[in-house]
Amino acid sequence: MDYEGNPIRPPSEASSIILQVAAGCPHNRCTFCGAYQGLKYHRKDDDIIDSDLAFAARYCQRLDRVFLADGDCLALPFADLCKIQDKISRALPWVRRTSLYASGRSIAGKSEAELIELKKRGYDRVYVGLESGDDELLGRVKKGSSAAEIINGCQRLRRAGFFVSITVLLGLAGPEGSEKHAHLTGRAISEMQPHQAAFLTLILVPGTPLYQAAQDGLFVLPSPGEMLAELAMMIETIAPETRLQIHANHASNYLPLAGRLPRDRERLLGALKAAQRGETTLKPDYLRGL
C-alpha cells in the first residue's frame, strides 16, 4: 500500500483496510495536532488508489471494512467520493462498510441529497472531532468550526443514516477552563446525540503551537486527577436520556474505560471517583501514546 506521511485512523478501525485517498488534512491548523506536520493536503492519483485496491483485493480478503485516510476525507468533492466508493465496490465486493473522518466544515459542504447518496453507496461510519463544546476554546485552538456547526453537522449525518462517532479531548482547556470545557461539551453531546463518543487525553506534541505555549508557560497541562475529574463532569452533564457508547480506552488515557449510557453511567462515574481517591493504579506517562 502506498502511504504518504503517517496515516492515522480511529482505534475502532484497527481491523480495517486503510486506503489513503488523500494525504494530509485540508485544515491542518489545530494548535494541538501534530499528525500532518509538513504535509500539504492533496488527493492521491487514481492510478495509486487503483494499485492499492488491487493489493487489498489480493492480500486483504479477510478484512471487510475500509477506512479512508487521511484527515477529513469528506472534504473531497462529492463526485470523487462516489468514484472512490464505486472503485471499492468493484475491487473489494466483500467489504460491508467504508468509514472516514469529517469536520463541521466538510459536512456543511455536502447537501442532504449528497449525504443520503453517499450512505446508499456504502459509506457508513463518520468520525468527527468535536474536541470541546466551548466555542471560545475551539477558537483558541483554531479548530476551524464552532460547536454549533459541528452539532448541526452530526445531526445531519444522523438524519442521512450514518453512524456518528465524535472525539473529545480531555485537558484541552487547561486547569482553569476545565469546568467550562466539561459542562459545555456534555451539553453539546446531549444536543448532537452521536452514536459513540471517544474521549482522548491531551498529549502535547513537539512542534505544535500548543506544545510551544506550554514551553513558554502560557499553557498548563492538567494533572491526571484533573483529567479524570473533567471526564466525570462531562458524563454527569450528558442528558440522562442520551443513548451513547462511551470509549475512554485510547492509548492516551490514564484510566481505560468503556460502557454505554445510560446503562453504565454510575459504574463509569464510580470508577472515575475511585481513581481520583487513589484506589486505582493509573497508566504511567511512559505507557501513554497517540
Image (tube, rainbow, N blue to C red):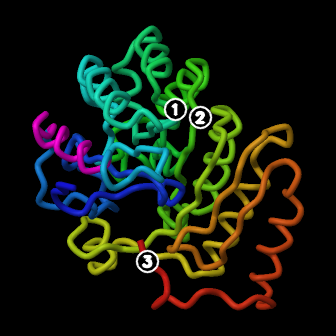
- Magenta residues, as a range? 43-56
**Distance from label 1 to label 2 (Cα)?**
6 Å
Residue placed most toward the observer, 171 or 100: 100
User: Which disc, if any, is residue 289?
Assistant: 3
CB contact under 8 Å: marks 1 and 3: no
- Tell me, yes or no, whether the two marked residues, 1 and 2, touch with CB atoms within 8 Å: yes
Residue 185 percent coordinates (x, y): 61, 47
Q: Which residue is mark 2?
A: 163
- How crowded pointer 3 is (Cα within 10 Å; few <14, some 14-19, many 20+) is rated as few
Which of these two is toward me, 125 or 40? 125
Quarter of the picture containing the C terminus is: bottom left
Could you tell me which residue is drawn at 79 percent across and 39 percent down?
Answer: 242
Quickly name the residue at label 1: 124
Q: Quadrant location of the N terminus?
A: bottom left
The local crowd at label 1, few if under 14, some if 14 to 19, many if 20 or more residues have their Cα within 10 Å, is: some
Locate residue 166, reporting x and y percent.
55, 45
Q: Amino acid at mark 1?
A: Asp
Magenta stretch, overall SS: helix
Label 2: few (<14), some (14–19) or many (≥20) C-alpha neighbours in 10 Å: some
